[in-house]
Amino acid sequence: MPAPLCFVSILLAWTAGSWATDHDLPFMEYLDVNHLVSLKWGFDDAQGNITFQLAVNTTGWVGFGLSPKGDMADADIVMGGLGPTGRYFADYYALEDAKPIMDEEQSYTLLSMNENDGKTIMTFQRSIETCDDKDFLITAQPIKLIYAYGTTDDIKYHGSRRGTKEVNLLNYKPRTTPPDAKYLSVKVENITLPPNITYYHCKVMKLPDLPTKHHIYRVMFLQLK
């Protein structure tokens, strides 16, 4: 018996300007010129938590830090990876251009660690304001971000696989629903599905005039039998 389809509802939303599709991590920067190292981040407010996602084209260890001068001296660092025995991750600090020291107070929390298509993706979180004097103070001023990575899970000297970029992490609009967001619901009603494994139904509809470019960020299908 063919299944009756009461309606298919497509929910469209758009804004007059661009809007990030990842609402948890709406901001992104490549930290290197070759686009091998990318950083996404997001926060709710300046007194809450900040979440980072570091993606690096390697299957070895990866490191990320906040630095006063763009080098390792006095930097607040996290390093981790996905090795033969599972994932590893820890909060470090550096006193000079030498191997970082593991912080006694682990202020960063690992949320996920994945390897996919030769890329390591490390997602982690910390409070914007911490009580650890080894942690870098995140403010609304530009911050020098540093990164490094290896080709294996043995954390050792990175060689040329390092870099720095100055970014203002907090001087962005916090994650909210755009105040000028508009929603449009489109329905296709009273359709009977034939007993085919795959079936496509086409219906032409006239939408409101959209004089400027808009970005659709959600499409929802609802089927009732």
Image (cartoon, rainbow, N blue to C red):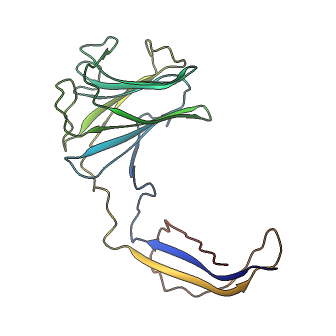
Figure check: 29 above or below 110: below
Q: Which residue lies at the image location 76% right of the left edge and 79% below the top edge?
A: 193
Figure check: 52 above or below 224: above
Q: Which residue lies at the image location 22% right of the left edge and 20% below the top edge?
A: 74
Which quarter of the image is occupied by the N terminus? bottom right
Identify the image quadrant of residue 141: top left
Measured as percent of width and height from the top left, residue 25 is found at 39, 49
**Is 68 left, or right, of 216 in this rendering?**
left
Measured as percent of width and height from the top left, residue 167 is found at 30, 40
Measured as percent of width and height from the top left, residue 109 is found at 35, 34
- In front of the other: 200 or 6: 6
- The number of numbered discs placed on residues in the rendered structure image is 0
**Is 7 left, or right, of 51 in this rendering?**
right
**Is 43 left, or right, of 134 in this rendering?**
right
**Is 185 left, or right, of 225 in this rendering?**
left
Which quarter of the image is occupied by the C terminus? bottom right
Figure check: 8 above or below 56: below
Q: Which residue lies at the image location 78% right of the left edge and 73% below the top edge?
A: 199
Measured as percent of width and height from the top left, residue 182 is found at 40, 77
- In front of the other: 220 or 142: 220
Q: Which residue lies at the image location 41% right of the left edge and 63% below the top edge?
A: 18
